[in-house]
Image (cartoon, rainbow, N blue to C red):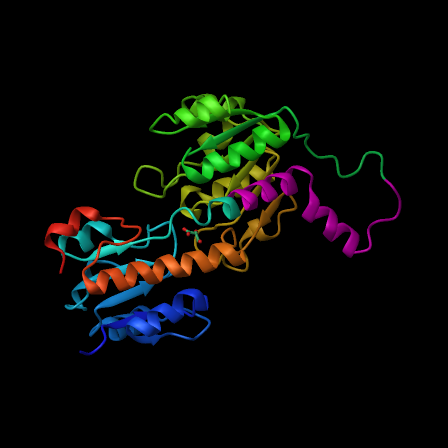
Amino acid sequence: MPKPKVFVTRLIPEAGLKKVREACDADVWSEPLPPSADELRKRVAGCDGLLSLLTERIDGALLDSAPRLKVVSNYAVGFNNIDVPAATERGICVGNTPGVLTDATADMAFSLLISAARRIVESQKYAEQGHWKTWEPLGHIGQDLVGRTIGIVGMGRIGFAMAKRCHGGWGMKVLYHDLHPNATAEKELSATRVDLDRLLAESDFISVHTDLNDTTRGMFNTATFKKMKPTAVFVNTARGPLVVEPDLVEALQQGTIFAAGLDVTDPEPPRTDNPLLRLPNCIVAPHIASATVSSRNAMAEIAADNLIAGVTGQPLRAWVNPEVAARRK
Ligand code: DGY
């Protein structure tokens, strides 16, 4: 019996790729840049499965160009690049990779928080450019961390892991904003669920861990930055379009807030003339929060398992749209 045909849109760690190659007839895109929309359409046309990245837009039109497609397995926990209702409508399963990048992402959020608060990247550039002439009693003054208040927007797995670092390690008070209460955070971290305005007004650090959807898109804008403290540090390791970037630029330039640490931008990559890349009080990393050996290997394994389950009619290990089960292709 011929193996199911799948398209894998980038080289992923061998831990997952090996499984895919063993179980499937795999076409693997090995270029460093993603396939164009046209190329993706052509490659996926005769496929039973697609292993995609967050760089690929998977919409109804693409799904229609692949009549045999049974599964889209995203190599990411986030799936805002996929039109999930369109997939469900067509009987196509969607998988993601939750749980295995929680600590790596929370570590990144905390690194950005402490680096932006203590002006580490700006100071490194200062030293590198030869401006370091003496010890400066008034230079490079940043924000204290111990005993301050962290505001978590989105108290899911990653938000909780970030709050745990801030509370356990640095004795911070935890405020959070989420549609749903998180009893564990309230019990273990004494976290308090508040409305967004209170979180913005009372937090010294604001770390974003919410999904990108029609409600959250652009939720950080001039109005919300103005509600933050002028000493606030804003951290985003979730998705770039949660922020209206020109508004963030203005808030950083005008001192409405103290600093920002970003692992995500809108678009990605940012244009080379994006002012965020040049502002001394902004750190921009190229979406690397999950980039640790164990996280990326585990993501590859789950994505492979989801893909293989999808093409063989099994339940997906991490299933975004389990409601499709009864009428899956
Ligand atoms: C995700 O998984 O959604 C991250 O943004 C990339 O690992």
Depth check: give the residue in front, 187 or 65.
187
Quarter of the figure with residue 58:
bottom left
Does 165 appear above or below 191? below
- Residue 71 lies left or right of residue 297; in this view the side is left
At x 68% / y 48%, what residue is drawn?
121
- Type of secondary structure dominating the magenta stretch: helix
Task: Report the side of 67 relative to 118 (left or right).
Answer: left
Residue furthest left in the image: 327
Horizontal and vertical percent for residue 43? Answer: 27, 75
Location of residue 192 with respect to 303 vertically, above or below: above
Tell me the quarter of the picture where residue 21 sits. Answer: bottom left
Residue 145 drawn in magenta: no
Q: Quadrant of the C terminus?
A: bottom left
Q: Residue at x 87, y 41 (%)?
A: 135
One can see residue 256 in this view:
no
Q: Nearer the viewer, residue 31 or 98?
A: 98
**In the rendered view, would you say 13 is above or below 164?**
below
Locate residue 234, reporting x and y percent: 54, 37
- Toward the right, the furthest residue is 134
Is residue 246 in sight in this rendering?
A: yes
Pick the residue in front: 248 or 179: 179
The residue that appears at 34% across and 63% down in the rendered structure is 304
In the displayed image of the protein, which residue is found farthest to the bottom? 2
Q: Tell me the quadrant of the picture where the N terminus can be found.
A: bottom left
Report the magenta residues as a range. 106-135
For residue 22, above or below residue 255: below
